[in-house]
Amino acid sequence: MPQREEEAGHPVTPPTRLREWAGQEHAEVRLRVAGNVSTPAETLAELARDADRMVRLMVAGNPQAPARVLALLADDTDLYVREMVGGNPNSPPEVLTRLAHDPHWVVRRDVAWNPQTRPELLVVLGRDKNAQVRGQALINAHMPASELETYARSRDQHVRSQVAVNPNMPAPTLRTLTHDPDSTARNAVAQNTRATEDMLRTLSGDATAQVRAHVAQHPKTPADVLQMLAQDPDPAVRQATHWVARHLVDDEAVIADHTRFDWELEPRDGWI
């Protein structure tokens, strides 16, 4: 059975074999088939009606799941199945709109995270009653710039730090946030892929070491600024600078690699 489970989850397994195993009595095999990106659409449609919630959940999270299957699972009785549909980039706009009003905040949060969620829906989610939902909407790159500018003037420092990391933030407002009285907002600017060299130069002299460390890791930081940070009195800043020196790659590739940035700005309670 372990070998069959492994093959059921392997992307090179022939579709004919996956269709056959979708009817297996053992749920673990069906679960692997449900999550396999090579599983045919009609087989995923069958598994979307499986009695086992974990099988349906794997279908809902499959990046190759067709829109019609995700539309079916959007009405699933299981909260976490709907959550997976809300975060699946293949979910059609009408499904995301419906799930944006789901009674459970975790579903709405994943819709707010989804890169395919429409800007007008993000505006609605940015005003959600739940802080986690609002936070995901504010860092979504498709949040309208006009909304981001409004939130950048919030009295809540955490709200400002969330929008400061959003790459859709207009440059003039982002520049203003480099002088924000709260270090978390300035730290977020230092992680924003749209930060300019001038902004990074300003932040390289920040009083907070964490801000300077993120400047050191930013792909747009000029060489002379990196040389200066390599002599920083804080060891964490020097370590960040040395990391960049060891992993120097093409600027465009680094900018596209969001894993170099600390995107996890956990939303907190409290609002504008």
Image: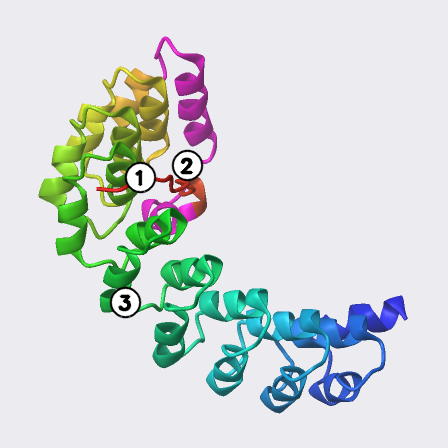
Tell me where residue 87 appears, x and y as whole percent. Answer: 46, 65
Circle on res. 251: none
**Which residue, given by chain and number where applicable, does mark 1 sit on?**
270
Specify whether residue 240 is painted magenta. Answer: yes
Which residue is found at the position 44% from the left and 65% from the top?
103
Q: Quadrant of the C terminus?
A: top left
Q: Main secondary structure of the magenta part?
A: helix
In the image, which residues are magenta? 230-258
Q: Where is residue 11 drawn, in percent x and y?
A: 67, 73
Looking at the image, the residue that sits furthest to the right is 1
Residue contact at pointers 3 and 2, CB within 8 angstroms? no
Marks 3 and 1, the one that precedes in the sequence: 3
Residue 227, how many percent across, how many down? 31, 19
Q: Element under label 1?
A: loop
The residue at 15%/32% (across/down) is 198
Mark 1 or mark 2: name the one nearer the start of the chain. Answer: 2
- Give amino acid for label 2: Leu
Callout 2: SS:
loop
Task: Specify whether 11 is left or right of 202.
Answer: right
Q: Is residue 130 above or below residue 159?
A: below
The vertical placement of 100 against 165, above or below, is below
Query: Looking at numbered disc 3 in the image, what kind of residue is underneath it?
Result: Leu
- Residue carrying label 3: 121
Can you tell which mark lies on residue 248? 2
Rate crowding at label 2 as few (under 14), some (14 to 19) or many (20 or more) other CA atoms within 10 Å: few
Q: CA distance from mark 1 to mark 2?
A: 40 Å
